[in-house]
Image (spheres, rainbow, N blue to C red):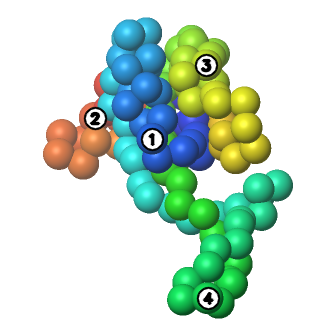
């Protein structure tokens, strides 16, 4: 099993969700996060004063999948979240040692 974490733009969530659903991938957790990379924030003006917004709002999607679905999910996320501009986000893939469904006690792929 693998865990995919994707940092994407807010307005791309529905596109990414639709692309994953179309590929038969369901179940995800989405969190609002703030951060920056090469984008490094931007400057804004408020009441005549200029200030820098360092941390930009993004969404973090987390999906746990069987190894056979990982590449399909990566391609769906990459294609649907891409705008071609700095700040499109990142995808992280890491192994998952164990999954346990709390309600039933199921483990492994049955728990996903």
Which residue was labeled with disc 2?
106
Is there a contact, CB below 8 Å, between mark 1 and mark 3?
no
Q: Distance between the residues labelled 1 and 2?
A: 35 Å
Which residue was labeled with disc 4?
48
Task: Please say if 58 is above or below 81.
Answer: below
Q: How far apart are marks 3 and 4 (CA)?
A: 40 Å
Using the rendered image of the protein, determine whether residue 48 is visible from the camera's viewpoint.
yes
Which residue was labeled with disc 3?
79
Q: How far apart are marks 3 and 2 (CA)?
A: 33 Å
Which residue is found at the position 60% from the left and 63% from the top?
Answer: 56
Which residue is found at the position 68% from the left and 83% from the top?
Answer: 51
Judged by depth in the image, the label closer to the viewer, 1 or 2, is 1
Judged by depth in the image, the label closer to the viewer, 2 or 4, is 4
Q: In which quarter of the image is residue 1?
A: top right
User: Quick one: 106 or 26, which is closer to the camera?
Assistant: 26
Q: How far apart are marks 1 and 4 (CA)?
A: 29 Å
Q: Distance between the residues labelled 1 and 3?
A: 14 Å
**Counting residues from the N terminus, which is met first, the one under dot 1 or under dot 2?**
1
* Spot occupied by residue 22 in the image (x, y as percentages of width and height): 38, 10
Q: How many marks?
A: 4
Q: Distance between the residues labelled 2 and 4?
A: 58 Å
Q: Dot 3 surroundings within 10 Å: few (below 14), some, or many (20 or more)?
A: few
Which residue was labeled with disc 1?
11
Is there a contact, CB below 8 Å, between mark 1 and mark 4?
no
Q: Dot 2 surroundings within 10 Å: few (below 14), some, or many (20 or more)?
A: few
């Amino acid at each position: 099993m693998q865990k995919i974490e994707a940092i994407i733009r807010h307005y791309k969530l529905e596109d990414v969700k639709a692309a994953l659903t179309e590929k038969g991938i369901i179940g995800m957790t989405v969190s609002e996060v703030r951060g920056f990379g090469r984008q490094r924030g931007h400057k804004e003006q408020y009441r005549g004063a200029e200030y820098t917004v360092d941390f930009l709002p993004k969404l973090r999607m987390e999906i746990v999948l069987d190894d056979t679905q990982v590449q399909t999910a990566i391609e769906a996320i990459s294609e649907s979240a891409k705008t071609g501009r700095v700040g499109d986000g990142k995808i992280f893939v890491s192994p998952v040692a164990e999954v346990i469904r709390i309600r039933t006690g199921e483990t492994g792929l049955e728990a996903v």
